[in-house]
Amino acid sequence: MAPKRKTSGVTKAKKAHKKSNDLILSVKDIQQLSQEVLETEKYNNLVNLIAQYAEIKKVLLVEENKQVETTARTLSLTLFKCFEKLIKNDQLSKKKSHDEKKSLVVKWLLNKYDSFKQVIYDFLTIKFAFKSSLQIDLLEICLNMIKLESQHMKAAAKDLFFPTLTYRKLIESLLCSANGDILSDGSNDDFILLEFTDRFIANWDLQFYFVHNLQDTLAEWKTTKTKQELRMVFSKFHTVMKNQILFSEDSEKLEAQQTWVSKLPSTVYKASQFKTNFQKCFNIILSYPLLESQYKSILLILHKRIIPYMAQPQSLMDFLTDCYDVTGDAIIPILALNSLYDLMKRFNLEYPDFYTKLYSLLTPDLLYTRYRSRFFRLCDLFLTSTHLSSNLVASFIKRLARLALAASASGVVIVIPFVYNLMKRHPSCMIMVHNTSFSKPGSYEDPFDINESNPLKTNAIGSSLWELETLMSHYHPNIATLAKIFGEPFRKHSYNLEDFLDWSYGTLLESEKNRRYKTMAALEFEEFDSLFDQKESSETPVYASGWTL
């Protein structure tokens, strides 16, 4: 007897795939089965229709099959119409007047309805072999089912009803979807989530219930999901926060619409309740193990897009102080400054050794980072008070002057007016410009300790700003001219720092190109007839290798 040939895994997959194709009903058969449900109440057909999704899933996971996709779309729409009729006819509502047989039928139909919703949730979390518009259609069908439930499932209730469980499971499916990748800005490019964000969540009720009771799910995921999964969840949550202005309808506008607001639960249209729920969700998701890019992306929008929607923003203080204390990467502390300052100003919160940490951010990398403008705006604000110690301010001046020696031209352009403004604001630091203690030539030894981390102990006030005199000989004429302001009497008003914060090599070159000269530039040149000048000589000219005349 000949030995049996072994079947490879690929062959098995192809056979299973072909079998799935054979088991999928035609569009005509699907329409026929659904017609029987609608007209003759042959509800057993629902079982066969829902079972089709298992075979459809097997095909779409392997290949892009437009015929199967069209069949799945028809199947979804017909099932939606079947359940829509059942919901509108109040056939999915349990009532005390029902006998045992009727109750069993209602229970069975509810089970099939839940199975259909579960299929939608599953399909939204799957990453098919291609971007399928079927998933967008299923998202819209699910939202229409939520609308149907809110209108008909609790029609007898005094207050309007919102199907929180159905909507929460939809949100969980969107946040756990395998579609999309984490982008460099910490958000996600999941096309289903973006469709949901762009078209649907602008509605105030969907915004409110997006964060309603979601904190329990987020807390549970923290203990059950892997780090990568949690980062994916955060990226999707952040995408919604980033692309939407939350709770766009305030309570006054909602309460003005008396025709229907009187029927709403009081918690729904109150901004305070929304802020409480949003705060709970956000505090939990910030405790996830995030990527560095995600920390940066959330800190960029925290003070404008997140804090205003929290009931108690001071609950972020621990998170912000942890970010501010990060060592090794100066970007995260710089980005945390905005929100940290906002909390300190609004809620009178204190941060121990705030200026020591601020001083530690003055590193050579600072003047090359893209967020330096943000830092200098805030630093200028923090050093405004005239009650600050001269030793403290002098340390900032000296450290910045030292950094300017090795900085890019666009970075030095910021430092010079910044230092000038500090000295105008704190005249006690003027001694650093002309310190007569070191009048003997060759006897100067800078007492400034650049390695000291405490700005009160660097002895900068006893130093001299020789770095500024060095900048007067800078290779770039604009900087050299700007630095010469320190060699003149301090009669000029303080600089407007905003005029210097956005300078770059491009703007410096553009200003030179567009500069108007009062007189014509003097030019002198000598014309030559050939590349090499041959002098009359008896000697044979010597050329570089390979060159001849």
Image (tube, helix red, strand yellow):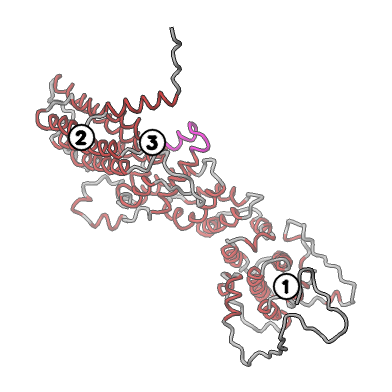
Please report contact status of discs 3 and 1: CB closer than 8 Å, yes or no: no
Position of residue 485 measured from the top left corner of the image (x, y, whole percent): 69, 81
Residue drawn at point x = 45 percent, y = 22 percent: 8
Give the residue type that dot 3 points to: Ile
Q: Report the residue at 49% width, 49% height from top.
A: 183
Q: Secondary structure at mark 3?
A: loop
Return the residue at label 2: 27
Q: Nearer the viewer, residue 347 or 403?
A: 403
**Magenta portion: prevailing SS class:** helix
Mark closest to the chain's N terminus, 2 or 1: 2
Range of magenta residues: 217-229
Q: Is residue 218 magenta?
A: yes
Foreground tag (2 vs 1): 2
The Cα atoms of the two marked residues, 3 and 2, are separated by 23 Å
Q: Quadrant of residue 54?
A: top left
Q: In the rendering, at what x and y percent does residue 1 appear?
A: 43, 6
Q: Nearer the viewer, residue 204 or 473?
A: 473
